[in-house]
């Protein structure tokens, strides 16, 4: 039997962090997506145990200042794209500069230096991931999704979708529909 799940990535991440910090009896405060403040100094052994425990979930403690800023850029982009309250009409360069307190040129250069990719590419990837979730979990059509994600046209969204995934959004929907159809026909 297959289950199709709809979930909020931010909520899942927060629950994993809460679970791991509580498991290790650490006093903490979650400040935002990807940022946790430890309320008491921890011993090196506790730090190692925390790091190991988080690594099981693909969560990495970022230690360098540049790495921290790049993670903040990624978190801000994910929040910008996935958060219903964020206005995607604002240019991403303005949004990131204001949110992180650095010039966009500096942020862009740093991001490219550390990740070997551009901020623009990361934004496209996140928008395509969100569009896939919307196609899977909502009744929104492609026109509504393109509007929601601030694309200039459905064709623009479709082109970026195909360039990123290798298939068109329509093909993606057909594949998902077929998989669901097959899953429903299979006996438990």
Image: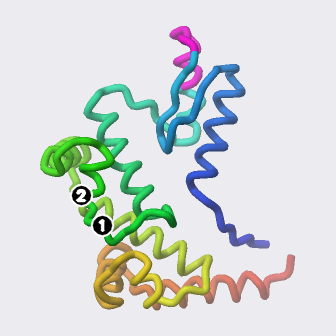
Q: Position of residue 57 (x, y in %)?
A: 57, 41
Q: Quadrant of residue 63?
A: top left
Local crowd size for mark 1, using a 10 Å CA cut-off: few (<14), some (14–19), many (≥20): few
Local crowd size for mark 2, using a 10 Å CA cut-off: few (<14), some (14–19), many (≥20): few
Quick one: 185 or 62, which is closer to the camera? 62
Is residue 181 placed above or below 50 in the rendered structure? below
Give yes or no for residue 42 being in the magenta stretch. yes
SS label for mark 2: helix
Q: Quadrant of residue 176?
A: bottom right
Q: Position of residue 120 (x, y in %)?
A: 24, 62
Residue 90: image tag: 1
Q: In screen coordinates, is 141 left or right of 92? A: right
Q: Position of residue 59 (x, y in %)?
A: 50, 39
Asked if disc 2 and disc 1 are in contact, CB closer than 8 Å, the reply is: yes
Is residue 100 placed above or below 10 in the rendered structure? above
Main SS, magenta residues = helix
Query: Which quarter of the figure is the N terminus placed in?
Result: bottom right
Q: In screen coordinates, is 76 left or right of 108? A: right
Residues in magenta? Answer: 40-50
SS label for mark 1: loop
Residue drawn at x 51%, y 10% as measured from the top left: 44
Question: Which residue in the protein does label 2 denote?
Answer: 94
Label 2 and label 1: CA atoms lie apart by 7 Å
Residue drawn at x 40%, y 60% as measured from the top left: 80
Q: In screen coordinates, is 128 left or right of 56? A: left
Give yes or no for residue 174 being in the magenta stretch. no
């Amino acid at each position: 039997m297959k289950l199709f799940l709809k979930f909020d990535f931010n909520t899942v991440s927060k629950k994993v962090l809460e679970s791991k910090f509580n498991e290790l009896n650490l006093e903490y405060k979650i400040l935002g997506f990807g940022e946790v403040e430890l309320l008491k100094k921890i011993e090196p052994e506790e730090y190692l145990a925390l790091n190991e425990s988080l690594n099981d979930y693909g969560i990495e403690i970022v230690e360098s200042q540049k790495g921290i800023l790049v993670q903040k850029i990624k978190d801000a982009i994910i929040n910008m794209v996935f958060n219903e309250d964020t206005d995607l009409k604002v240019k991403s360069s303005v949004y990131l500069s204001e949110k992180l307190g650095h010039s966009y040129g500096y942020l862009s250069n740093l991001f490219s230096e550390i990740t070997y990719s551009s901020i623009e590419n990361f934004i496209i990837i996140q928008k395509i991931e969100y569009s896939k979730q919307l196609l899977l979990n909502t009744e929104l059509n492609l026109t509504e999704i393109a509007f929601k994600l601030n694309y200039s046209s459905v064709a623009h969204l479709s082109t970026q979708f195909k360039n990123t995934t290798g298939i068109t959004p329509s093909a993606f929907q057909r594949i998902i529909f077929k998989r669901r159809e097959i899953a429903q026909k299979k006996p438990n």
